[in-house]
Amino acid sequence: MRKLAQALEEAGYHTLNIDYPSRQYAIETLSDQVISEALSHVPAEASLHFVTHSLGGILLRQYLLKHDIPNLGRVVMLAPPNHGSQIADWLQPYSFYHWFFGPVAAELGTKNNRTLEHLGAADYDVGVIAGSRAFNLFCAPFLPKPNDGQVSVASTRLQGMTDHITLPVSHPFMMSRPRVIRQVLIFLKQGHFDHNGNHC
C-alpha cells in the first residue's frame, strides 16, 4: 500500500498505513485491533477516510456493525470479498489452508457464511473498485468471470454502496496501479468514480 499512501500524502491527506496479523485471529478480533489502532491516531475533530484492500474492507464493515465512527468520511474498498470467495470454498476441506491462513480461513467462503451475511448493507459513503485481470491462473478457473484471480467482480458488490467500478487490474497488485490510485483520489474528493476515464 506504500505507493497508494504516498499518492494520498501528496494529495494533502495525512495517511496511516496499518499492517496487521491477518493469519492469527478471526475477523471480529482483527477488526477491533486494526480499526481501534487507526482511530487512536486520529484527532476527534478530523474527518477520517478509509482505503482498504481485500480483507481490510471486511474488517471495516465488521467494526461499523458494532461501533459508530462519528467523524467517518468516505470509504474506498479495493477488491473486497463482500460475498466471500469460491477459492475459499474449494480449499475448505484441506488442513494446510486453515494452517496457513489461520482462523480467518473459515470465514471467507461463499456458503453458509454467518460472518459475512451478518455484516449488512452500507449506510455510509463507500465506493468499491473491482479487478478483472487474473494473473493467478491456478485460482482464476474456480471463480466466476470476471475476476481478479482471487475475488470475482460480483463478490465485491455491496448493498448500499455509493459507486462501483471495474478496472483491468489483478488482486495482489491493484493498489499500486496508477489507474486505481487515480480513482481512489477521485472518489475521496468527489464521492464518485470517473467512469468516463476509467482506462486512463
Image (spheres, helix red, strand yellow):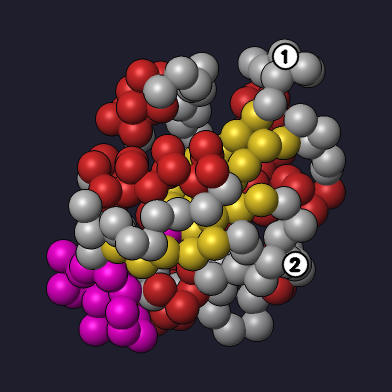
Q: Residue at x 49, y 46 (%)?
A: 187
The kind of residue on which mark 2 rests is Gly
| 2 or 1: mark nearer the eye | 1
Picture disc at residue 120: 2
**Is residue 96 in sight in this rendering?**
no
Q: Residue at x 23, y 45 (%)?
A: 177
Determine the main secondary structure of the stretch shown in magenta.
loop
Quick one: label 2 or label 1, which is nearer the N terminus?
1
- Using the image, determine if residue 126 lies above or below residue 188: below
**Is residue 53 in sight in this rendering?**
yes
Q: Residue at x 38, y 47 (%)?
A: 183
Magenta range is 129-150
102 relative to 147 in the view: left or right? right
x, y percentage for residue 61? 67, 53
Circle 1 packing at 10 Å, graded few (<14), some (14-19), many (20+), is few
The residue that disc 1 covers is 43
Outermost residue on the front side: it is 196
